[in-house]
Image: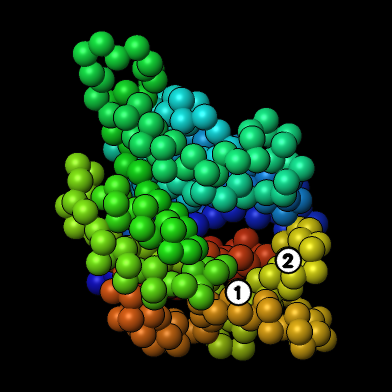
Amino acid sequence: MVRLSVLDLAYIGEGFMPADALANALDLARHSETAGYLRFWLAEHHNLAGIASAATAVCIGHVASGTSTIRVGAGGIMLPNHSPMVIAEQFGTLATLFPGRIDLGLGRAPGTDQRTLQALRRGLDASEHFPQDVVELQALLGPPHEGQTLRAIPGEDTNVPLWILGSSLYGAQLAAMLGLPYAFASHFAPQALHQAVTIYRQKFEPFEQLAEPYVMVGCNVVVAETDSEARRLFTTPQQQFTRMVRGNRGHLPPPVDDIENFWSPIEKARASSMLGCSFHGTPKTIRNQLAPLIEATCADELMVVGAIWDHAARVRSYELLARAMA
């Protein structure tokens, strides 16, 4: 049976504050732990009004300290925004505080706009060094060697599991070459999913962390007691992605009764394309919808995004999904 995990962006809903989002993230992690989810990941984004997980390592510490068994990690850290040394120290500290529970997913995109990238004090060409940065980070988190002068403390020999995140063929090839698990961001860019997964498995080279390829597939899932209620709740991510198309993201919006009154035909087409790996319905409906995705990708794990404005409904959605897939 495919494993289930949670991807959270600490959404700030309309009418709420960052403190609410961070409290909700911890509450959702606790419920996810009880429901049997394997991981709870937070994503790095900057300069976005509706996301409170910018200081991702701090958020991970917040969630890990309030849970006991669920793995907590980054899905991901946008490595071009940081020096490998800083990330090794941050996640080495987290792994020291919460041994055996920390994951580190790594992305090549900056996760923000060009002006914010400059404010982060990293060069505009930082993403070009991504493969070298991953290898450097891996070495800093691994066992020390004789004569080594650069050491991450805490960090060295924590061997925090690394993941490569991607939405294109580039990440698939890199993950395969380095022998790392691969997570595809099909929850917002599903177009290359099947080709990327195929390339990853074909080119995978076993290495110290992983003997066989391991694929995680991202998807948006909204589950409710009725199909009509799930459809209504799903209008929140539909509005969210439409605002992305418009270049005006804002806070996470509440659901609407008729999404057709919100978007234009062109906006609908573009937003629906990005939401191509999305599912909503009752537990039975969702189970039937997810089965073809799992079969087609041979996914080892689903990383589930639930952008639902009402926190109680969001928690309930994840609980119903866990029961449906048990």
Name the amino acid type tagged 2: Met
User: The C terminus appears in which quarter of the rendering?
Assistant: bottom left
Q: Which residue is mark 1?
A: 274
Q: Nearer the viewer, residue 317 or 101?
A: 101
Q: Which residue is mark 2?
A: 244
- Mark 1–mark 2 CB contact (< 8 Å): yes
Instruction: Decide if residue 135 is in sight here.
Output: yes
x, y percentage for residue 3? 31, 64
Secondary structure at numbered mark 2: helix
Name the amino acid type tagged 1: Met
Residue 42 as seen in the image, left or right of residue 115 = left
x, y percentage for residue 279? 51, 80
| Residue 91, quarter of the rendered image | top left
Residue 52 as seen in the image, left or right of residue 162 = right
Q: How many numbered callouts? A: 2
Secondary structure at numbered mark 1: helix
Residue 206 as seen in the image, left or right of residue 125 = left
Residue at position x 57%, y 50% in the image = 109
Instruction: Decide if residue 56 is in sight here.
Output: no
Spatial CA span between label 1 and label 2: 10 Å
Indicate how the structure is coloured in the image: rainbow
The dot on residue 190 is none
Task: Look at the picture and state if 164 lies above or below 325.
Answer: above
Residue at position x 31%, y 71% in the image = 198
Residue at position x 29%, y 38% in the image = 100
x, y percentage for residue 73? 43, 44
Task: Look at the picture and state if 315 lies above or below 266.
Answer: above
User: The N terminus appears in which quarter of the rendering?
Assistant: bottom left
Task: Look at the picture and state if 103 lies above or below 14.
Answer: above
Q: Nearer the viewer, residue 167 or 12?
A: 167
